Image (tube, rainbow, N blue to C red):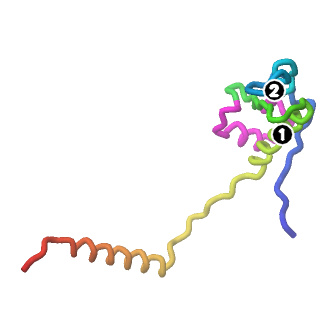
Amino acid sequence: MIPRPLSFPIDPDEVELSAIRAQGAGGQNVNKVSSAVHLRYDILASSLPPDVKERLLALRDSRITQEGVLVLKAQQHRTQEMNRNDALARLQAVVDSVAAPPRVRRATKPTYGSKQRRLEGKSQRSEIKSSRGRVQD
């Protein structure tokens, strides 16, 4: 059986969504309609498990404020509903990226063959460099 990655669904009551006007080109539609979505998700006040919160706050992501609030802006689509779905999907993707704990690295010793190949490469390189000396007649 293939193990499925852990997923922690986001509670919609914990997400703060607000409609804003989109930036950039787009003509009259952009100037009149608030189709972009501004999403705010307070990580510390969320119902996520403590270890997931810790890994989420440890991310080096400019979208996470010092207060522990994840801020996303979605303005890719023309409709507010599509931008809302896009923002929620991106939030779920960020949470899913830290859902599984990182694998612990176990130190291993290099094999005998890898040691021999390394030493052989060093001796070949040494031969090349020693042959670069001044030519003697």
Of the residues shown, which amino acid type is indicated by label 1? Leu
Answer whether residue 121 is visible to the viewer in this image.
yes
Residue at left 78%, top 40%? 50
Residue occupying image coordinates x 37% and y 79%: 120
Where is residue 99? Give x, y as percent.
Answer: 78, 48
How crowded is the residue under tag 1: few (<14 C-alpha within 10 Å), some, or many (20+)? some
Looking at this view, name the residue that lies furthest to the front. 27
Judging by the rendered image, the residue that carries numbered circle 1 is: 48
Q: Nearer the viewer, residue 129 or 49?
A: 129
Q: Nearer the viewer, mark 2 or mark 1?
A: 2
The residue positioned 48% from the left and 81% from the top of the image is: 113
Question: Observer-nearest residue: 82 or 124?
Answer: 82
Q: Which mark is residue 38?
A: 2
Q: Residue at x 17, y 71 (%)?
A: 133
Quick check: marks 2 and 1 in contact, CB under 8 Å? no
- 132 left or right of 95 in image: left
- What span is colored magenta in the figure? 39-64
Left or right: 110, with 83 as reference point? left
Q: Quadrant of residue 57?
A: top right
